[in-house]
Image (spheres, rainbow, N blue to C red):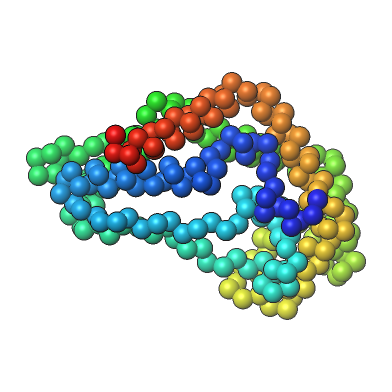
């Protein structure tokens, strides 16, 4: 696999999660429901801030560092991620927003979980499903893939390649998670390690082997959990329908 393809690479279980566009739709509707709830208590939050754009592909960093340009310029350093913008809520409105306070505000009952809880319920109404299922199955398949003899052999080949370049690591997570490489700026040793890491992954086709094995385990999980996963897909459709009604003010 060309590691450049990872920005668009999809694993089988990805089909059972909302797309980025769908997440934006759901997120905007949740914000709208939250804002309307707060307005009902006399708090006009005005226009809510838009979330920052996501630039990375969903699986772009699933197998560690794979971009040689990034390796040569910043190593394993991850730039600070922008925090999702939060609406400006006056202090007296925060208990209403979160539900962590008195159960009434100026004589009006505060919803369970506050306006945040009410917004979540409006989005998920009629969408009963196991919200953690896809993540749990993905984690299980990932662990099975790393324990698979084919991936282990690819790890050993990568490790041997790294040794030839002067680095002693048994698996690609070790340099990626090395505390010495967690600073804000990469030093020469980190750059050299990262560059060798990416080149060795390409030389032994580590990502291609790893991804294909993981995809096979995910397909097996899908077959074993077909009904539950169909419920997840149905729940996403329901949430999108709820989002459309909220956004349209219905």
Locate residue 50, reporting x and y percent.
40, 57
Locate residue 108, reporting x and y percent.
13, 39
Q: Which residue is farthest bottom?
A: 188
Q: Residue at x 23, y 37 (%)?
A: 111
How many numbered circles does the render carry? 0
Q: Which residue is farthest front?
A: 248
Against 178, residue 95 (above or below) is above
Q: Residue at x 60, y 65 (%)?
A: 78
Quarter of the image that includes the C terminus: top left
Q: Which residue is farthest left?
A: 107
Q: Can residue 113 be seen here? A: no
Q: Nearer the viewer, residue 76 or 122?
A: 122
Locate residue 248, reporting x and y percent.
33, 39
Q: Can residue 153 be seen here? A: yes
Q: Nearer the viewer, residue 246 or 171?
A: 246
88 on left or right of 215: left
Q: Residue at x 44, y 44 (%)?
A: 25
Against 147, residue 74 (above or below) is below
Q: Quadrant of residue 84?
A: bottom left
53 on left or right of 225: left
Locate residue 138, reporting x and y percent.
64, 38
Q: Residue at x 44, y 26 (%)?
A: 128
52 on left or right of 15: left
Q: Quadrant of residue 15?
A: top right
208 on left or right of 128: right
């Amino acid at each position: 696999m060309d590691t450049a393809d990872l920005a668009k690479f999809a694993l089988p279980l990805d089909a059972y999660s909302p797309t980025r566009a769908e997440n934006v739709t759901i997120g905007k509707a949740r914000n709208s429901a939250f804002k309307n709830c707060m307005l009902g208590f006399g708090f006009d939050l005005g226009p809510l801030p838009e979330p920052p754009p996501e630039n990375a592909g969903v699986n772009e960093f699933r197998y560690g560092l794979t971009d040689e340009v990034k390796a040569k310029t910043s190593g394993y350093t991850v730039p600070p991620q922008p925090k999702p913008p939060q609406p400006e809520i006056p202090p007296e409105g925060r208990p209403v927003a979160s539900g962590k306070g008195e159960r009434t505000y100026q004589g009006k009952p505060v919803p369970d979980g506050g306006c945040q809880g009410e917004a979540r319920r409006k989005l998920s109404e009629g969408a009963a499903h196991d919200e953690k299922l896809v993540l749990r199955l993905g984690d299980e398949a990932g662990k099975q893939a790393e324990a698979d003899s084919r991936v282990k052999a690819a790890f050993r080949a990568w490790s041997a390649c790294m040794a030839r370049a002067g680095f002693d690591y048994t698996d690609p997570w070790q340099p990626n998670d090395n505390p010495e490489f967690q600073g804000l700026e990469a030093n020469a040793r980190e750059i050299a390690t990262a560059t060798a890491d990416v080149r060795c992954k390409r030389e032994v086709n580590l990502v291609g082997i790893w991804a294909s094995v993981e995809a096979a385990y995910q397909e097996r999980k899908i077959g074993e959990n077909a009904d539950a996963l169909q419920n997840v897909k149905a729940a996403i459709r329901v949430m999108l329908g709820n989002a459309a009604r909220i956004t349209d003010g219905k």
